[in-house]
Amino acid sequence: MVYVMLTREEEAMLNGEMGEGVRRAMEIIVALGKIYNASGLVKIESAHISGVSYKNLGDEGLEFLEEFASMGVKTMVEATLNPAGMDMELWEELGFSREFAEKQIRIVKAYEKMGVKTTCTCTPYLVENKPKFGQHIAWGESSAIIYANSILGARTNRESGISALASAITGRTAKYGLHLDENRLADYVIKVKCNVKGISDFGALGYLIGKRVGNKVPYITGIETADLDELKSLGASMAASGAVGLFHMENITPEAKIKKIVKDGAEEIEIEDLREAYEALNYDAREIDVVSIGCPHASIDEIGKVANMIKGRKINSQLWITTSRKVYDEAKRRGLLDIINEAGGKVIRDTCMVVAPIEELGFKTLATNSAKMATLAPLHSKVKVRFGSLEDCIKAAISGVWNDN
Ligand code: F3S
């Protein structure tokens, strides 16, 4: 029988001495520890909780959260929330139904009652939950997990919404997987032999790597420079096409800079061309209903680029730029929202085109510069997708059609 070593405080939590809600949360953590052969638990600095949209949770998820919140449990560490199914303020204006909105608001309130910050963003690291190198955390949301592990050098497994919530309540996670040094070494060396430039190219590269390495750790060589938006796109698509939780990049990511990070005998893969990804992620759609920018949620730089490109123009399809509240406020302060609104675009908070019920809004075709969005939207939102550069997407927003040339 697998034995997970607990401290006296952890035993007390498991025995219900700190209340029924804490007992249930600790039970989840210990069960995971047993499944993954963890020798014990580790204290965490923060949690990020996925599983927020009513579209994904349904009534069962809503009832579970309200029941849990009614037990009086409170988070022990900083805890932030992933995107919900709608903009929490503009939902009516955007066409979301009252029935959906009421249930979505109840879900967010249940999290709030437990002490979770209702940030509703998949880029908590851009706003207020930015872990430091070496810190143990328990995060849900695959794009945020891979960013925290790879770019920040923090340590988290790919948590589910419920396990991240249990960790937020107990302040602990089971010590296994990516919390341990030996599991952070690369299994594959990826030699990139082609030009990679811009968010869509980095997403295309991530798509190809994720497909090849599954849930293993890749070490990427051949990239000379990459900005943070490109790295967040790379990681997000790798985590979506595969199940990668951590990557390293020569001279760029922090762990690769300080020690030998590749396992002996690691397999080598060469990537010479990104076309395979662009072909796999493009459907046959010409008229574009909506252009989606901001997956993962847009940074202020991305919003600035879009504003520059559409300044003084009028768009013909819908243009949704999804982002966090803090970045939205900053974009407003800099006058970027006015430029985008005048062109007919929208900057939307709290949600995205995958977790929002966009089928109900009548969108059938979508263009995006995000390989993660292009991978998931056909499955989750039943839309035909065109995937290309930011320039291609803005041209499509202005003309209303996708141009292959
Ligand atoms: Fe974020 Fe939605 Fe993309 S949660 S990573 S914008 S699919």
Image (cartoon, grey):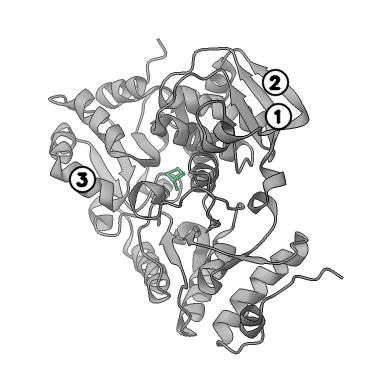
Q: Which residue is mark 1?
A: 188
Residue 388 position (above or below residue 292): above
Where is residue 173 drawn, in percent x and y? 61, 64
Q: Check if mark 3's residue and mark 1's residue have beta carbons within 8 Å.
A: no
Which residue is disc 2 drawn over? 269
Mark 3 and mark 1: Cα distance apart in space: 40 Å
Q: Residues within 10 Å of mark 1 (few under 14, many from 20)?
A: many
Q: CA distance from mark 2 to mark 3?
A: 41 Å
Q: Residue at x 39, y 65 (%)?
A: 104
Mark 2 Cβ inside 8 Å of ligand 1: no
In the image, residue 108 above or below residue 340: below
- When asked about the image quadrant of residue 160, the answer is bottom right
Q: Amino acid at mark 3?
A: Glu
Kind of residue indicated by mark 2: Ile
Label located before the other in sequence (1 or 2): 1
Q: Nearer the viewer, residue 133 or 17?
A: 133
Q: Residue at x 28, y 52 (%)?
A: 325
